[in-house]
Amino acid sequence: MAYDFQVVIDSTNPHELADWWAEAFGWDVEPSDEDFIRDMVRQGFATEEETTTHRGTLVWRVGAAILGPGSATGERRRILFQLVPEPKTVKNRAHLDMRVGQDRIDGELRRLLDSGARLLHHGRQGPHHRWVTIADPEGNELCLT
């Protein structure tokens, strides 16, 4: 049996990081259902402390997600950014590759560096394949390929 999955990235500020990755990938931040959140608090299933406001919208404090193209039609490409108390301290054992095409790497690198990414290193395999490893604003690695 095949299973669906989502990628989860730890974050000390999940809503800001979700905004950054949504902009980086051209995806959408998953909308918040403020009425549902208020209803859960009103019924005692959640507390006010479990919520926060981000860009004027009531959201769950513990996480934010971004949705890839096609999510509205049933494809569930989703990355969840979950709140953790500690900052990132070591290299990731897994990372995402953003496939932009060899001819677009330099332009995308400039765009992402301008938005808060940090250059980690350039890589090359043979004469025609190269990639660039960067870190998001919290230090999570990602490759442009």
Image (cartoon, rainbow, N blue to C red):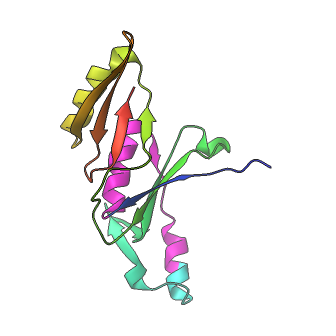
Q: Is residue 86 above or below residue 88?
A: below
Q: Is residue 20 above or below residue 55?
A: above
* Residue at the limit of the structure toward the bottom, as seen here: 44
Name the foreground residue: 37 vs 4: 4
Residue at position x 36%, y 40% in the image: 142
Does residue 99 show up?
yes
Q: How many marks?
A: 0
In the rendered image, the vertical position of residue 80 relative to residue 68, given as above or below: below
Q: Is residue 32 magenta?
A: yes
Image quadrant containing the C terminus: top left
Q: Nearer the viewer, residue 73 or 136?
A: 136
The answer to if 139 sits in the magenta stretch is no
**Which residue does the image show at 39% across and 10% down from the upper left?**
128
Tell me residue 127's x, y (percent): 36, 9
- Magenta region, residue range: 12-38
Evaluate whether residue 26 shows in this view.
Answer: no
The image position of residue 113, as x and y in percent, is 21, 36
In the picture, measured across the screen, residue 50 lies left or right of residue 115, that is right
Instruction: Please state the horizontal and vertical placement of residue 7, each as a whole percent of the image.
Output: 52, 51
User: Residue 110 sits in which quadrant?
Assistant: top left
**Residue at coordinates 42% horizontally, 79% vertically from top-left?**
50
Q: Residue furthest top?
A: 127
Instruction: Decide: is 28 above or below 61.
Output: above
Rendered residue at 55%/72% (across/down): 36
**Extreme-front residue of the structure:** 126
Specify the principal SS of the magenta part: helix
99 relative to 123 in the view: left or right: right
Q: Residue 21 in the image: x percent, y percent?
A: 37, 45
